[in-house]
Image: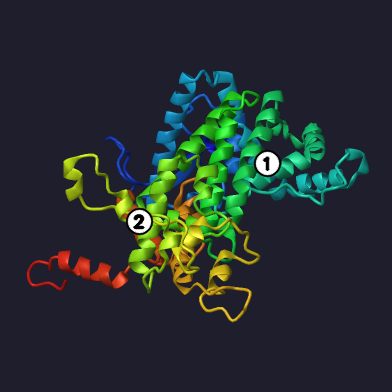
Amino acid sequence: QAVISFFFKQAKRKKVVKSKKGSAKRTTAPSAPTENDDVEEVILWEDDPSADAEDLAMAAEIHEPADDASPTGQDIHDVNVTNTLRGVAIQHMRTAGVVISAGEEKDALKVFPKVAGLAKKVHDSRPIHTEFAAIINNPATGLSTDSNTTELARRNATRWGSEYQCLRTRHILEPAVDALIADKNLKLGAYAFNARQKTLAIELETILEILEVPTKLFQSQNRPLIIDVIPEMEDLDFALNAISTASDQSNVTRVAAYAGLLVLRKYYALLDECEAYRIAIVMCPHRKLQWFRQRCGWNDDQVSDLRSLVVRRFTESYKTSPTTASPSSSGVSASSTVSKSRPADRFRRPTTSLNPAITESDNIHTYLDAPLCEPTTSVIEYWTARLKSSNPSIVSTPDLARYALSFCSCPGKLFLFIPTSVDSERAFSEGRNQIAWNQHSMSSQAFRAQMSLASWSDAPFFDLQATVAALNRQIRPLRAGGAE
């Protein structure tokens, strides 16, 4: 939403109350409609009294039935986040010298209405659809023979990625689209791009193409795991940042990419509050601690702190037997770490350093210090094979395997609720019918709490029974002896 809002002039549906025939004329200020009133919905450009007939026609064309759904708690939250960070992005980029001119803003806001409006027009009008098919089949049109695309993709407000498909198919079929619009008898001139809009459409398509990879991951039949989602978010962060700083991109495109980046980082930063996500990445044998250094730019202190966290969690919760290591392999003795430079030092507790060279295979230090290895199977299958291996070529490491599986199997459900380019229905690909009830009356704060609990429910660190017991202790009985 944050990205596409710069290229999509939103249509606003305004309800106009009309009195039924025979009812008394209204002489007071307008109020809520009654049962004696007719309510007509009119589609207008949002906050734009200067919209011309061409604008209003396009607004009607891009309107979809799915747009009529009552706003839910997530919708309200998404809009608030988008609008707030959109303004922040504009201000930050203006400070950096990237300013969107009035002309560029006006052209950009009509890019997607023209794309979606034309696609809807072609699909809904039989004469136009027939003419477009004839143009497609005409070799003289000059379409690429490498593509099998023959239709303009239509915007679907409840499906991820439909905006990208709209832009992509128009780009592929550009010669046919130009020929269709050039036919004056069809009166489609309003959907033609000017030179700047054609450039902006290509740039927007590039951003949405980058978003396509995580979109497909979220749409897959198998529930995405956090070890799959986090790297995609890192790649997305890198790409959006690169676009926002690219001097060869239009200013509005750079600001739009930066707005998307702010939304991503707003939610991505929440990962720091939960150790499970970082441990999950470390327990991927092809990533480990190096991933945070190479991909996130962490310094030595940050990596060292993370290592301590991973080791502590393993030792406290998953190690079933004490670590055994010979003195020769430890490399450090207890007495060697005691300073004798001050008289008080002889009374201090001796300290020993952690041993990074322990040779025991089922040990977290051995795992962390071993070279990275690319699993030939999925990470889950990799560790499952090491729970109790019957293959002589695979060393059993049951403690490490249980540790890794507990965290690597953590679902990436949290990211399904990030307000990127999705509506609430898109976010609920699983069980949306069950949780869509009564959202129109739910506050955004309550919705966020509900979604957080839903995302935690399958996590290894979440104990449902303990949570229920804690809630029961805090909930007070209703008054007058009511049930709890």
Residue 289 in view (yes/no): yes
Question: Tag on residue 477?
Answer: none
Asked if residue 61 lies left or right of residue 181, the reply is: left
Q: Residue lying furthest right in this view?
A: 140
Q: Nearer the viewer, residue 423 or 125?
A: 423
Q: Residue lying furthest left in this view?
A: 480
Question: Tag on residue 333?
Answer: 2
Residue 45 pos. (x, y %)? 51, 33
Whichever of labels 2 and 1 marks the residue nearer the N terminus, that label is 1
Q: Say which residue label 1 marks.
A: 167
**Mark 2 belongs to which amino acid?**
Ser
Instruction: Categorize mark 2 by other alpha carbons within 10 Å: few (<14), some (14-19), many (20+).
Output: few
**Rendered view: 159 above or below 437:** above
**Rendered view: 287 above or below 138:** below
Residue at image point 56% right, 25% down: 105
Disc 2 secondary structure class: loop
Instruction: Categorize mark 1 by other alpha carbons within 10 Å: few (<14), some (14-19), many (20+).
Output: many
**Mark 1 belongs to which amino acid?**
Leu
Image quarter in which the C terminus is found: bottom left
Residue at image point 13% right, 65% down: 476
Residue 1 pos. (x, y %)? 51, 41
